[in-house]
Image (spheres, rainbow, N blue to C red):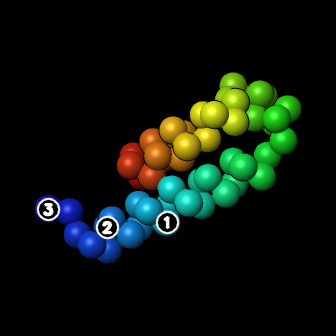
Amino acid sequence: MKTISGYFGRLRRYYVAVRELSSLTDRELADLGLQRRDISRVAYETAITR
């Protein structure tokens, strides 16, 4: 059963991941195999799987 605290924990992880990835340069993202358009998807996947 999913809890409210679990939801907010995932939401926080999502925003942290978005903030961290957004702070990278395009070159740094490319080194990771990402583009700016991938940030939201990768952040979501990170929030859900942890």
Residue 42 shows up from this direction = yes
Seen as rendered, the residue at the extreme bottom is 5
Residue at image coords 41%, 60%: 10
Per the image, the residue denoted by label 1 is 12
The disc at residue 35 is none
Q: Earlier in the sequence, mark 2 or mark 1?
A: 2
Across and down, in percent, residue 3 comes to 23, 69
Across and down, in percent, residue 31 comes to 78, 28
> Vertically, is 42 above or below 18?
above
Residue at disc 2, secondary structure: helix
Q: Label 1 amino acid?
A: Arg
> Vertically, is 25 above or below 15?
above
Tell me if mark 3 has few (under 14), some (14-19) or many (20+) residues whose alpha carbon lies within 10 angstroms of its own: few
Q: Label 2 amino acid?
A: Gly
> Vertically, is 15 above or below 22?
below
Residue at image coords 49%, 66%: 12
Disc 2 + disc 1, Cβ < 8 Å: no
Per the image, the residue denoted by label 3 is 1
Residue at disc 1, secondary structure: helix
Residue at disc 3, secondary structure: loop
Between 29 and 50, the one lying in front of the other is: 29
Residue at image coords 82%, 35%: 26
Per the image, the residue denoted by label 2 is 6
Residue at image coords 39%, 46%: 49
Q: Earlier in the sequence, mark 3 or mark 1?
A: 3
Distance between the alpha carbons at the discs numbered 2 and 3: 10 Å
Residue 32 shows up from this direction = no
Seen as rendered, the residue at the extreme left is 1
Across and down, in percent, residue 19 comes to 67, 57
